[in-house]
Amino acid sequence: MPPATIRSETRLSRPQKVAEAIKQWVMDEGLQPGHRLPSETELIRRFAMAKGTIREAIRLLEAQGLVKSRTGPGGGVFVHQVSEGRAAALLGNYVYFANPTIDDIYQLRSALEPELAESLAGRLSPAQLAELEGTLAESAPPAASAEGEAARHAASLRFHAELAALSENPLLRFVIRFLAELLSEVTVTRGLHSPTDPELWTSGLAYQRRLIEALRDGDGPRARALMAAHMATAHGLMHTREAAVTRRFLPEGNRR
């Protein structure tokens, strides 16, 4: 077995280069989650690297969630599929320091969610539509406390995450679900969900109920238009709330 070619990238350490080469080799070979990687001895020979470099490369891949080691009989290093939860957590760590605004989040939601809505029109089963309606019911009752308002807000955003979960497009599904979770986290941690905003909830529920009707009727253009209007209305209301909260916490001399 001839040594694999490792691309020269000066900014990467030797273990990082080997890790990238292993990932490329896995793709070239068409290996799937659960397939075993060659033994350590075979990897040393294939990539023409020392044992310590190979082991560090495997540790890097494990940290990324791309391989998993098992000990004992039948053990070894196996290709592993990164879960959506782990991917979202890693992306969330990056976004935490990016400090996105409501405008940032809705710029993406406004582009993606109307596309999602149109793609699902006429494709959902009665059971799936009933589940969406059940989620709406959880967000409908008036909230009597800040905790209740947070729970109702989470249920409203869960509607969008559940809708995304029904998409056949894995990228669209992941990004929209991530944005819904991010928006839920941002609004709660920044206090944007409290006090109760009747206009936000009334308009949101109205759009979501009409959207379910369009999905049931198989009317893609109407589903797209309703979701676009829903995003625009929610964006405007949330932007206003964010600005009000920001002003509330600014020193008196910094207010404009």
Image (cartoon, helix red, strand yellow):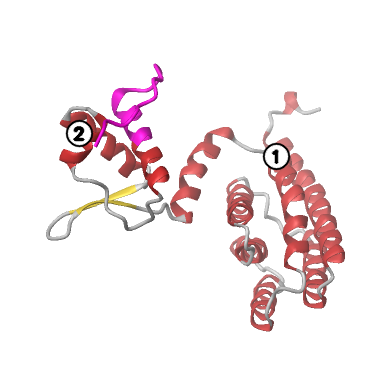
Q: Residues within 10 Å of mark 1 (few under 14, many from 20)?
A: few
- Type of amino acid under label 2: Arg
Rendered image quadrant of residue 39? top left
Mark-to-mark CA distance, 1 and 2: 48 Å
Tell me the quadrant of the picture where the C terminus can be found.
top right
Residue sitting farthest toward the left: 73
Quarter location, residue 233 = bottom right
Q: Position of residue 203 (x, y in %)?
A: 83, 63
Q: Residue at x 31, y 44 (%)?
A: 62
Say whether disc 1 or disc 2 marks the residue closer to the N-terminus.
Answer: 2
Q: Which residues are magenta?
A: 1-21
Q: Which element is circle 1 on?
A: helix
User: Is the residue marked by circle 2 packed among few (<14), some (14-19), or many (20+) residues within 10 Å?
Assistant: some
Residue extending farthest to the top is 10
Residue position for label 1? 104
Q: Is residue 187 left or right of residue 110?
A: left
Predominant SS along the magenta part: loop
| Residue at point 82%, 48% (across, down) | 236
Q: Position of residue 177 (x, y in %)?
A: 60, 56
Residue 12 magenta-highlighted:
yes
Q: Amino acid at mark 1?
A: Asp
Q: Which residue is mark 2?
A: 45
Looking at the image, residue 22 lies above or below residue 135: above
54 in magenta? no
Q: Secondary structure at mark 2?
A: helix
Residue 91 in picture, x, y percent from top left? 51, 43
Q: Among all residues in the image, which is located at the extreme bottom? A: 126
* Residue 239 as seen in the image, left or right of residue 98: right
Q: Is residue 251 left or right of residue 214?
A: left
Is residue 84 shown left or right of residue 252?
Answer: left
Q: Considering depth in this image, is 220 or 160 the residue closer to the camera?
A: 220
Snapshot quadrant of residue 216 = bottom right
